[in-house]
Structure formats: structure tokens, C-alpha cells
Image (cartoon, rainbow, N blue to C red):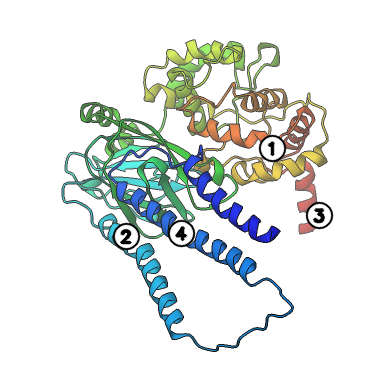
């Protein structure tokens, strides 16, 4: 009797919870209401089967409970019962599969008037490409992907010169206009998903997949990777902003094209030296940093990272938080760098600085810190050398007091919470593995032992003895 009551309560309670639950699907913001209808049908069919089975089990327990005088009756076949079960099962399977097949047929047939946007997945961020005025994408080649050409565009293909490149995880789409998303990966399998659009698709290395949708509501929507793609999979997020057509056109006009980026070229260290003159007072003539000025070391950082941080300071993505006093001091200087070329020149000059050893100021357990650093090594490298492709700066040789402060800022959300600081957003999540101040000091103490991929005098002597 108790088991029967439990089964009935479980079945009825599940039905009540389904209708009264505070959780549900995110509000629909695309044309894929049919997907919601398919999900509802699935809930109804599976829910009805769930209730029927539990009620039947309770009925069987009550009606056929043990009685000493009762004997079982052997009936190996019951054609009528088998026919009913086969028919009901067939109807249930058809109800589950048929709606999905119709929706999938629409999902893979793109309207002729859809415009195209390419989505590129990479550990661990999204970037985007739009066709230029000619309406055509330029050719891409996997072997052409490098630090200077992260999209892998063929420079000899004239169709690619006007391609619009968005090297950030923020993209805008026009409302009420069909869009075909062309998906490709530069490393491993990802999956591009925006819950409000009810649309997702695997992003495969070596091939181009696609999906389409029509945004129906303006607003900001989070794009996530729905395929386990590595250590920072959970932090691989982007933002899709749906706007009016006019705002979309204005935004596209402000983005650089492949041809424009090629024309900019590399920064000029000599021109950067004149601009860097105003940095010397804090960061030192060789970018060694000055703790008394709370100015970190710059020598050893690559130009891409320097440019991105200067841009973040200028745009307010960094240095705006009231608790970031020294970041606020950087903003006025960054505002004097009026364009991308000036940023590139300063960064190119900084790259010419020699990397000298720094004096340790943090006491921590380096052995314990090594365990924490295993997560960091996925992006920053086993030797703390940094990985430009992953937008991860060099850590080896950097001021330990500065690393402690920045990690604390990431943990507290002082840095990295601005919606335009994509890689800072990832660091906010990753920094949470440092559970206390001791863990923070320990990992920085371990970073202080790293060579940045450069051999130490001890390693050189060991190598020399090995060669002898």
C-alpha cells in the first residue's frame, strides 16, 4: 500500500510541478517557435507515458497484492493486448519524431533573402566575419591562419579584401531579417548556441556547417559553446546584440575590413618611442615597471596584448571601476592615443625592450601553486610564456605584486566584468579556482619560478654538460 501511494504521489506531484514550476524556457527571440511547440509535444507524450506507467504500477500493486488463496494464471499470449500496446507505442513514437522532422526540414532550408555572417570558434572565444560590399566571402585557408591572419583569409583573393572582420565575441544582427550563420572552427569541435534563438549547431574543424534564424526581438543575448572544448569551455561566451537595421549598418561601417588591416601593417617602434616618452615616469625607460609608482612591467608583453589593453582603457572596458585606482590613472593616457596606428606604434616599441629578471616580493608555497597553475597553463603556457592565439599574455617574469593585485581584481569583479572585456570575462571565471589569499600567493610564487620558455643559466649549464 505504501509503495502504491508513493507512486501515485510521485506521478501527480510531477504533473503539478510541471505546471507550477518557476523554471522554464528563456523567452523566445527568433522565428523558431516551432521548436518550442516540438518541446511541448515531447513533454506531453513522455509525461503521459510517465503518469500511465506509474498509475498502472500502483493499480497492479493494489489489485494483485499477495493473497494466500489466490493463484496465478499463465497466459503466454494476448493478441488484443499486444495490438493495443503496439498501436499506442507507434502513435507515441510518431508524435515524438514527426514534429521534429518537419522542424528540421525548415531548419536546414535557408531562405533566399537571408544575409550571411560567419562565426569562427576558437579556444576559447568567438569571432565573426561579414561579406563586404560585393556580398561575397573571400577564400580562407587553414594553413594561412597565424598571428597576423587569425581568420586565415587568402590575401590574393580580391573578394576577401572588403570582408568585415570582428575580432571580438560581440556581434550585432538586424531584427526581422533572416540570417545564415556559417560556422567553422580553427582548432577543436565547438557548438554555437543562443538559448533565446532556440538555435545551435556544431562548429567543426575542417568544414563549414550552418544554421539560420530570424531575430524577432531587440536586445543582448548570450552566445555560449555547448560542446566540451577544453579547460576554459565554461568561459567561452559571447554576445549577440539584435538591433534595428540602421544601427546594424552603422556598426558594420565602423568595423575594419581585411584590406584595411593589411594596410595598417605592423607598428613603427621609432614612432612608438616618441609616444612612450610619457610612459617613462611610471613604467621606466625600458618598461621594467616601478612598484613605488604601482606601474607594472611592460617588457615581455606582446604587441597584441598591449594594444588590446590600451584599447580597453580608452573605451572604458578597463579602469572604470571605482576600486581600480591605478587603472583610472591609465585611462587619461590611453585617451591620448587617438587611433589604432598609435596603439600599434607604442606596442611595437615596447616589444623591443629586453626582458630582465624581476625581484620576488611575494612569499608563497610554489609547490602548492604548481597545482593551481595547471589550469592556467592551458592558456598561458606551461612556462608562462603566453599564447597569442589564445589572447593570453606572458606571465613569466612579470611583477609578482602586480599579478597578485590583478588576480584579486578578477576575483572581486573589479576587472573583467565590463561587457566589452571578453578575455577579462574569462579570467573572472578562471580566477575563482583560487579559493583564498594563500592560494593566490602560492600560484604567483610558482609563476615566479617559470622561465617563459627561455633557458635559465642553470638549464644552459645542464645542457652543456649533457652535450659533452
The residues bearing labels 4 and 3 have C-alpha atoms spaced at a distance of: 76 Å
> What is the quadrant of residue 196 in the picture?
top left
Of mark 3 and mark 1, the one earlier in the sequence is: 1
Q: Which of 75 and 377 lies nearest the eye of the viewer?
A: 75
Is 152 placed above or below 279 here? below
Of mark 4 and mark 1, the one earlier in the sequence is: 4
The residue lying at 71 percent from left, 34 percent from top is: 434
Task: Bin the neighbour count of mark 1 within 10 Å (Cα to Cα): few under 14, some 14-19, many 20 and up.
Answer: some
Residue 175 shows in the view: yes
Q: Dot 1 corresponds to which residue?
A: 433
The residues bearing labels 2 and 3 have C-alpha atoms spaced at a distance of: 72 Å
Give the side of residue 421 with respect to residue 464, left or right. left
Of mark 4 and mark 3, the one earlier in the sequence is: 4
Residue 368 is tagged as none
Q: Dot 3 corresponds to which residue?
A: 465
Disc nearest the viewer among 4 and 1? 4
Disc nearest the viewer among 1 and 2? 2
> What is the quadrant of residue 457 in the picture?
top right
Q: Dot 2 corresponds to which residue?
A: 99
The spot of residue 302 in percent (x, y) is 53, 33
* Count of numbered circles in the view: 4
The spot of residue 8 in percent (x, y) is 59, 56
Disc nearest the viewer among 2 and 3? 2
Q: Dot 4 corresponds to which residue?
A: 48
Quadrant housing the N terminus: bottom right
User: In the structure shown, which secondary structural element does the residue marked by tag 1 occupy?
Assistant: helix
The spot of residue 187 in percent (x, y) is 48, 54
Amino acid at each position: 500500500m505504501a509503495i502504491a501511494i508513493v507512486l501515485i504521489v510521485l506521478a501527480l506531484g510531477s504533473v503539478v510541478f510541471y505546471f507550477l514550476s518557476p523554471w522554464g524556457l528563456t523567452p523566445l527571440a527568433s522565428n523558431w517557435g516551432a521548436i518550442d511547440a516540438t518541446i511541448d509535444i515531447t513533454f506531453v507524450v513522455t509525461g503521459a507515458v510517465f503518469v500511465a506507467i506509474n498509475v498502472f504500477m500502483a493499480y497492479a500493486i493494489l489489485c494483485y497484492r499477495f493473497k494466500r488463496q489466490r493463484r496465478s494464471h499463465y497466459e503466454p499470449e494476448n493478441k488484443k493486448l499486444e495490438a493495443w500496446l503496439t498501436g499506442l507505442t507507434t502513435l507515441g513514437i510518431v508524435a515524438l519524431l514527426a514534429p521534429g522532422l518537419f522542424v528540421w526540414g525548415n531548419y536546414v532550408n535557408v531562405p533566399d533573402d537571408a544575409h550571411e555572417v560567419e562565426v569562427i570558434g576558437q579556444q576559447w572565444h568567438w569571432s565573426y566575419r561579414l561579406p563586404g560590399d560585393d556580398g561575397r566571402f573571400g577564400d580562407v585557408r587553414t594553413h594561412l591562419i597565424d598571428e597576423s591572419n587569425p581568420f586565415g583569409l587568402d590575401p590574393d583573393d580580391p573578394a576577401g579584401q572588403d570582408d568585415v572582420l570582428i575580432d571580438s565575441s560581440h556581434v550585432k544582427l538586424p531584427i526581422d531579417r533572416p540570417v545564415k550563420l556559417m560556422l567553422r572552427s580553427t582548432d577543436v569541435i565547438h557548438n554555437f548556441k543562443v538559448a533565446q534563438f532556440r538555435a545551435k549547431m556544431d562548429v567543426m574543424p575542417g568544414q563549414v556547417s550552418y544554421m539560420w534564424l530570424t531575430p524577432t526581438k531587440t536586445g543582448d543575448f548570450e552566445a555560449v559553446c555547448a560542446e566540451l572544448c577544453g579547460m576554459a569551455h565554461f568561459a567561452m561566451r559571447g554576445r549577440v546584440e539584435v538591433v534595428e537595421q540602421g544601427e546594424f549598418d552603422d556598426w558594420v561601417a565602423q568595423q575594419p575590413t581585411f584590406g584595411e588591416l593589411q594596410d595598417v601593417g605592423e607598428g613603427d617602434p621609432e614612432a612608438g618611442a616618441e609616444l612612450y616618452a610619457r610612459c617613462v615616469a611610471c613604467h621606466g625607460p625600458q618598461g621594467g615597471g616601478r612598484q613605488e609608482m604601482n606601474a607594472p612591467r611592460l617588457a615581455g608583453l606582446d604587441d597584441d596584448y598591449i594594444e588590446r589593453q590600451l584599447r580597453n582603457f580608452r573605451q572604458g572596458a578597463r579602469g572604470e571601476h571605482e576600486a581600480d585606482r591605478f587603472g583610472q590613472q591609465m585611462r587619461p593616457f590611453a585617451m591620448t592615443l587617438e587611433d589604432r596606428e598609435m596603439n600599434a606604434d607604442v606596442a611595437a616599441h615596447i616589444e623591443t625592450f629586453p626582458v630582465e629578471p624581476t625581484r620576488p616580493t611575494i612569499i608563497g608555497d610554489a609547490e602548492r601553486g604548481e597545482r593551481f597553475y595547471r589550469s592556467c597553463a592551458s592558456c598561458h603556457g606551461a612556462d608562462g610564456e603566453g599564447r597569442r592565439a589564445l589572447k593570453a599574455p606572458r606571465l613569466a617574469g612579470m611583477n609578482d605584486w602586480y599579478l597578485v593585485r590583478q588576480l584579486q581584481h578578477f576575483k572581486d569583479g573589479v576587472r573583467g566584468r565590463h561587457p566589452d572585456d571578453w578575455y577579462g570575462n574569462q579570467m573572472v571565471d578562471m580566477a575563482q579556482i583560487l579559493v583564498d589569499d594563500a592560494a593566490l600567493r602560492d600560484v604567483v610564487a610558482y609563476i615566479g619560478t617559470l622561465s617563459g620558455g627561455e633557458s635559465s643559466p642553470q638549464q644552459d649549464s645542464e645542457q652543456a654538460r649533457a652535450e659533452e
